[in-house]
Image: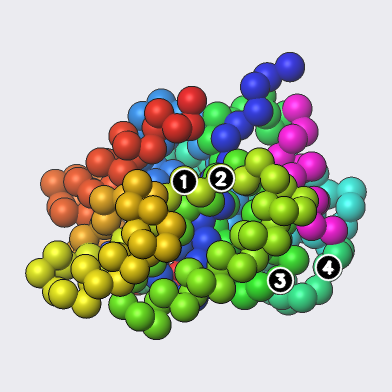
Amino acid sequence: MSTLPQIIAISNRKGGTGKTTVSVNLAAELAALGRRVLLVDLDSQGHCAVGLGIKLTRGDAAVHGIFTDPDVRLASVIRETAFENLSLAPADQLFEHGSGLRDECRLARALAEEEIAASFDVVIVDTPPSLDILLLNALTAANWVLVPYVPHHLSFEGVRQLMRVLFKVMTGANPGLKILGFLPNTTADHIRLHRAVTGEVSRQFGAHRVLTGIRSDIRLAEAFAAGKPVRHYAPTSRGALDFADLGVRLLPALG
Ligand SMILES: Nc1ncnc2c1ncn2[C@@H]1O[C@H](COP(=O)(O)OP(=O)(O)O)[C@@H](O)[C@H]1O
Ligand SMILES: [Mg+2]
């Protein structure tokens, strides 16, 4: 038996907080640090493929297949990327949220299969912001949840809504789920409002859970459009430095 991979869900109930940016770039950092990484894209917008330069065509095998057909194996939808140690289970852009099997343990079971456990050390799951069976699957499968948030008040509501779901999952299907951290994204230290909301997260969840943030950097958006993780697109940029730092900081928790 192989050791089970460490599974990290990247979640916030609000869109546009950097879930996909963090998923793609953290996956690339951990891969560069020698971990065999599988990125699972549960958001049917399919943005993880875009950020990794993978063009999908209609009808391509996608992770959402496991939710519509109990016979589909996760291993059959995984593809290698242009980046060493980094594989992707792409999203199905035609998947209708709210459709499919009503089984919140489907992803957990798929990730526990021997061929996945033998092939990967870390699984990163990018999640949709909507509260549906896909988000519940991600949180039920995960060992860890990492919460990127934009430090202003509207964004904090997304964190609050996520915490309600987390509490349900932790007291139900997945008591082992732990918070890997809250990650301020698009930070600018000199703006007081950002400090205030990061202060709010610290007060509610503990300062030790707030990670050093990812600064605002246009290079992150450019890298995404170019289909590359920022470490490959602009290795000396602020975004690349911040993600490199994040990867090194999180590695010890991931064993
Ligand atoms: N630190 C950052 N600096 C600059 N732009 C960012 C940063 N993080 C994310 N973005 C941009 O913000 C937008 C939303 O990010 P995205 O990762 O798609 O969020 P989500 O997946 O939560 O909806 C994207 O255009 C992305 O390129
Ligand atoms: Mg996204």
Relative side of 66 to 223, left or right: right
Q: Which kind of residue does numbered mark 4 sit on? A: Gly
- Residue 230 appearing in the image: no
**Which disc is residue 178 wearing?**
2
Instruction: Measuring from the top left, give residue 56's x and y in whole percent.
Output: 57, 62
The mark that comes first in sequence, 1 or 3, is: 3
Q: Position of residue 179 (x, y in %)?
A: 51, 49
Q: Mark 4 CB in 8 Å range of ligand 2?
A: no
Q: Disc 2 marks which amino acid?
A: Lys
Residue 236 left/right relative to 26: left
Residue at the spot of label 1: 180
Q: Is 100 a magenta residue?
A: no
The location of residue 7, given as percent across then percent down, is: 58, 41
State the residue in front, 211 or 125. Answer: 211
List the single residue furthest toward the bottom: 154
**Label 2 – label 3 distance at C-alpha:** 20 Å
Which residue is under mark 4?
100
Q: In this picture, which residue range is highlighted in magenta?
A: 103-114
Residues at discs 1 and 3 in contact (Cβ within 8 Å)? no
**10 Å crowding of disc 3: few (<14), some (14-19), many (20+):** some
Amino acid type shown at disc 3: Asp
Q: Residues within 10 Å of mark 1 (few under 14, many from 20)?
A: many
Give the residue type at disc 1: Leu
Give percent across and percent down for residue 117. Answer: 67, 29
